[in-house]
Image: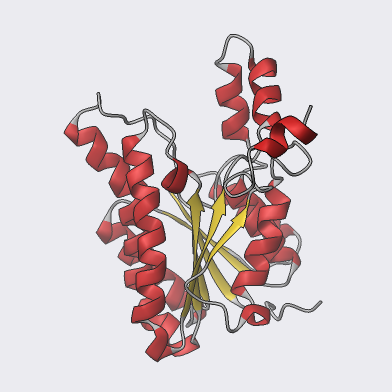
Amino acid sequence: MDLGLKNKVVVVSGGAGKEGSIGVTIIKMLADEGAIPVIIDRNERGNVYVNQFKDKGIDSLFCQTDVTDPTQMQSAVSKIAQKYGRIDVIINNVGVNDGVGLSATYEAFMASLKLNLASYFLLAKFALPYLKKSKGNILNIGSKVALTGQGATSGYAAAKGGVLALTREWAVALIEYGIRSNAIIIAESFTPAYDEWLKTLPDGGAALAKINKSIPFEARMTKPEEIGNTVLFLISDRSSHTTGQFVFVDGGYVHLDRALINDINV
């Protein structure tokens, strides 16, 4: 199926993670579709990915940016617009489950909100004039923590709850401009960050087995590529009448009967 993403300028915040992360998986899949992946991230690793694209003849851009800084975010968007003259899609992909719970300081809580929520607002705000011209769309990467809770992560949970609220707020606010706004909700996906967390546990293997068992469909984590496939569809014109939606790519983790875990995944 041709998704019609060729030459679309797609901005991905948090797109310079480690190899195998959701952000990097997305930018590589965008490149495979012929889109122009634009990375906004504070990590200079973004240069590595852009150079890899250029070696393959793929146009791309990296804007090294502190996504919590309004001035830097505005500058990044201006740089993108100056080079391409348009922005077709923004994908808000920043997310750090930082463990900022009730025992944390107010300052730490606010820092978590700035990173995991305010950065989404900033990218949407500054990209909006260009999205209006292109009748583009917004895709926010969310987390099941917004709906299920997790414990000891008040900042991240509050931010991800806010992401879902903003998704529908923007869907309503931007209807008159023909701009769609959707969110993907992820539960358990095996990324480099997840792997690093498991390695901090006394028995990471046992923890991983327990997590896998908790996922109803096939008793395994969602692959980043499976998330990427859904991302590509939702930002494409193939989902042209889909807006204000929370799309769960989670193997049934959030909604399916917990009895399935005992009956099937043993």
> Residue reaching furthest top?
202
Residue 208 visible in image: yes
Q: Nearer the viewer, residue 234 or 215?
A: 215
Q: Is residue 172 left or right of residue 57?
A: left
The C terminus, quarter of image:
top right
The N terminus, quarter of image:
bottom right
Query: Measured along the vertical axis of the image, is residue 201 above or below residue 118?
Result: above
Q: Residue 137: x percent and y percent? A: 50, 76
Q: Residue 162: x percent and y percent? A: 34, 55
**Protein image colouring:** secondary structure
Query: Measured along the vertical axis of the image, is residue 166 above or below residue 133?
Result: above
Residue depicted at 74% across the width and 70% down the height: 33
Residue depicted at 64% across the width and 57% down the height: 26
Residue depicted at 40% across the width and 33% down the height: 98
Q: Nearer the viewer, residue 52 or 68?
A: 68
Q: Is residue 109 left or right of residue 124?
A: left
Residue depicted at 67% across the width and 52% down the height: 25
Query: Measured along the vertical axis of the image, is residue 56 above or below residue 233?
Result: above
Query: Measured along the vertical axis of the image, is residue 104 above or below residue 215?
Result: above
